[in-house]
Image: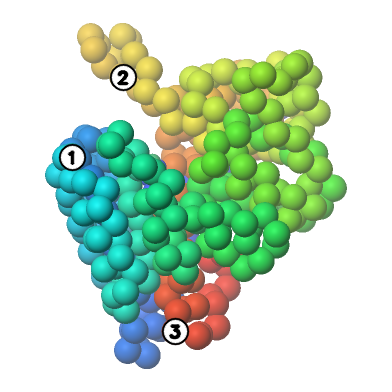
Amino acid sequence: MTADIIDGKAFAANIRLKVAKHVTNLKAQGITPGLAVVLVGEDPASEVYVRSKGEMTLEVGMNTFEHKLPADATQAELLAVIHQLNNDPTVHGILCQLPVPDHIDETTVINAIVAEKDVDGFNILNVGRLATGQKSMVPCTPLGSLMMLRDRLGSLSGLNAVVVGRSNIVGKPMVQLLLKDSCTVTITHSRTKDIEAICRNADILVAAVGRPEMINADWIKPGAVVIDVGINRIPAPERGEGKMRLVGDVDFASASKVAGAITPVPGGVGPMTIACLLANTVTACCRAAGLLEPDGLTV
Ligand code: GUN
């Protein structure tokens, strides 16, 4: 069997198109959705992410607000920026790029963002709302993964889903979304016994551990849908000295011979994350304005 490749790039472009259409409609009603991104320090990877988020926000016609603080900014200074954004009616979504420097408490920062503008879906209120089936902001990477799964499989009801990894950002919210869609869900992690056998029982396998190419063909049930959330940079001497390449948590070469469908890295889940961030901002904007929520941009 050779797996179908799930084209996250094309999928994400389609979501951005839908977002842009909704933005046009909102603008016709005098509302321009706005996304504020806060960055503390000069981490090069974070700067790339933030720039790319800003560019895509503009591309879909929304306002972008960037707030850069020096690496030695105090927690109080960061919280003051967040409070100002919380109270700014032109800002519908707020994201503080993680990680923040060690002297700042990440949880305090996340929970300082008012839940209705928390487009990351990391605030404790959104975590609780998602877990109890209430309307919430849904974390972007799991949201994008679920959209691709629904597109591939239609109903997920009754399917065995295995999530590898228990992070607050991906693993745990992914479990909630799969449960909401009536999957039988197992969450596995570094201490799980016989993890391979558990994964081999999965109709849906979501890999989010951050271990390069950990999951190979032996872990995969023939025909399963594999969502690879991992983005790992590994040395690529074949490309020249000091060169690196991106790989997922799944060994794509072997897994794609067994799976029914699989997301590649790069070009799979990655592009969906920013597209879903834009989608969440439009959703937040519509909710703030008391308008009907756009179809197909959230779950
Ligand atoms: N850093 C890496 N990924 C993310 C993300 O999805 N949201 C935020 N806020 N920071 C990140």
Residue 110: image tag: none
Residue at horizontal 74 percent and vertical 50 percent from the top: 179
Q: Which residue is mark 1?
A: 71
Residue at horizontal 38 percent and vertical 65 percent from the top: 93
Is residue 210 something one can see in this rendering? yes
Residue 206 quadrant: top right
Q: Is mark 3 within 8 Å of ligand 1?
A: no
Q: Which residue is mark 3?
A: 289
What amino acid is at disc 1?
Ala
Q: Residue furthest bottom?
A: 29
Q: Mark 3: which secondary structure?
A: helix
Q: Residues within 10 Å of mark 1 (few under 14, many from 20)?
A: some
The answer to whether residue 13 is above or below residue 199 is below
Mark 2 and mark 3: span between their CA atoms?
Answer: 46 Å
Is residue 228 something one can see in this rendering? no
What amino acid is at disc 3?
Ala
What amino acid is at disc 2?
Met
Residue 171 percent location from the top left of the image = 60, 39
Residue 124 percent location from the top left of the image = 53, 54
The answer to whether residue 295 is above or below residue 44 is below
The numbered mark, 2 or 3, whose residue comes first in the sequence reads 2
Residue 244: image tag: 2
Residue 71 quadrant: top left
Colour pattern:
rainbow
Q: Residues within 10 Å of mark 2 (few under 14, many from 20)?
A: some
